[in-house]
Image: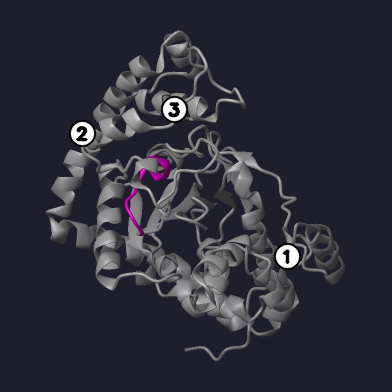
Amino acid sequence: MGCSLLSHFSMVTYSAPRFVSSTSSGLSIGGYLRRTRMIRQQAGGDFRCFCSSVAVSEPVNSESSSSPVRKRIVSGVQPTGSIHLGNYLGAIKNWIRLQDTYETFFFIVDLHAITLQYEAQQLLKATRDTAAIYLACGVDPSKASVFVQSHVRAHVELMWLLSSATPIGWLNRMIQFKEKSRKAGDENVGVALLTYPVLMAADILLYQSDLVPVGEDQKQHLELTRELAERVNYLYGGRKWKKLGGRGGALFKVPEPLIPPTGARIMSLTDGLSKMSKSAPSDQSRINLLDSKDVIANKIKRCKTDAFPGLEFDNAERPECNNLLSIYQLVSGKTKQEVAEECRDMNWGTFKIVLTDALVDHLHPIQVRYEEIISDSSYLDEVLAEGARKAADIADVTVNNVYQAMGFLKR
């Protein structure tokens, strides 16, 4: 999951969840087992995604063109560290465009922020700061619902239900658990680090998600969610659910990956082959959205470059050059061709001044708006409470269906 929930926006239908017949949802044992055998091919012990992908720039509508039904988008970012340029350009900036076309739910994934050791006071502050940054960046509460993950209890409830159907071997193969547990040591690693992918699956499946935005390099991370959806549909859905008084059919939609446009993968300022990350030890590696003008100028001045003449996109031998040009393209609003022509003959000294000015100009309005929002705590609390109410209305439908299908006594 990293700093963002697969950077994930998830799309489902505007209306209450609809369920298709067991035949069309692939609930037959033969279909389930055939797909499982295909997907469980592995590369280096990890999932390989065989799912298709859809470009984020064009809305996918499963309804007829005459239908007013809108897709729903759900996405979130962890309140750990500072929101940086990679979070903004790779996820949040895209939300602003999407909220005009879809029913949108954007949440702060605070439950994912406690998988490793953390400071409680820092989490509290970072959660509010992240919500304020969402709004400062242009997320409009009149168009989108903004809420805190832990304020919708169905996330945790569904995670526990899914955990009972998740083979431990699936989790043992997840790359992040291996890497982080090795670095931190067994005594410093909680069970949550192993099981957080199940919570991630709950976050996605809770809203009957059609699509989940991921980078090309993250598609395999979505496969656990897809396998869990199919597994639970097979174990508890269809006729089995109907015999318990349910409507039958699939309990969950099986989501597909949604590939965001350029900007989904902003790289470190100190290493053009590594993603910009909150967890990187050096703050020099990232531009934080709330960095001052002087801090931004210093970071760009000291960022890693190369000794090649001129500037160009898409040269594999120049990852830092490609990254910095991409950042300039995204914050300036220019096309790739316009940036290529403008910067082709520039030296690094000249370009760094141009890039710094573009970053400062782009981030200044966000910083001003953030200060206004964070100073009005009652407004921010009201936005988060209303967002949680709307999200819970939808999430409770899904989790109650799962309770019913799994044989729990109705409350």
Tell me the residue that label 1 is attached to. 21
Find numbered disc 3 in the image and state the secondary structure of the residue it sits on. Answer: helix
Find numbered disc 1 in the image and state the secondary structure of the residue it sits on. Answer: loop
Q: CA distance from mark 3 to mark 1?
A: 50 Å
Question: Which badge, 2 or 3, is on the more N-terminal residue?
Answer: 2
- Above-or-below relation of 186 to 320: below
Q: CA distance from mark 2 to mark 3?
A: 18 Å
In this rendering, which labeled residue sits more in front, label 3 or label 1? 3
Question: Which badge, 1 or 2, is on the more N-terminal residue?
Answer: 1
The answer to which quarter of the image holds residue 175 is bottom right
Amino acid type assigned to the residue bearing label 1 in the image: Ser
Tell me the residue that label 2 is attached to. 294
Q: From the top left corner, tell me how far across and down residue 40 is, in percent.
A: 79, 62
Amino acid type assigned to the residue bearing label 2 in the image: Asp
Q: From the top left corner, tell me how far across and down residue 143 is, in percent.
A: 33, 47
Residue situated in front as seen by the camera: 346 or 33: 346
Tell me the residue that label 3 is attached to. 324
Q: Residue at x 56, y 51 (%)?
A: 212
Amino acid type assigned to the residue bearing label 3 in the image: Leu
Horizontal side of 221 relative to 395 (left or right) equals right
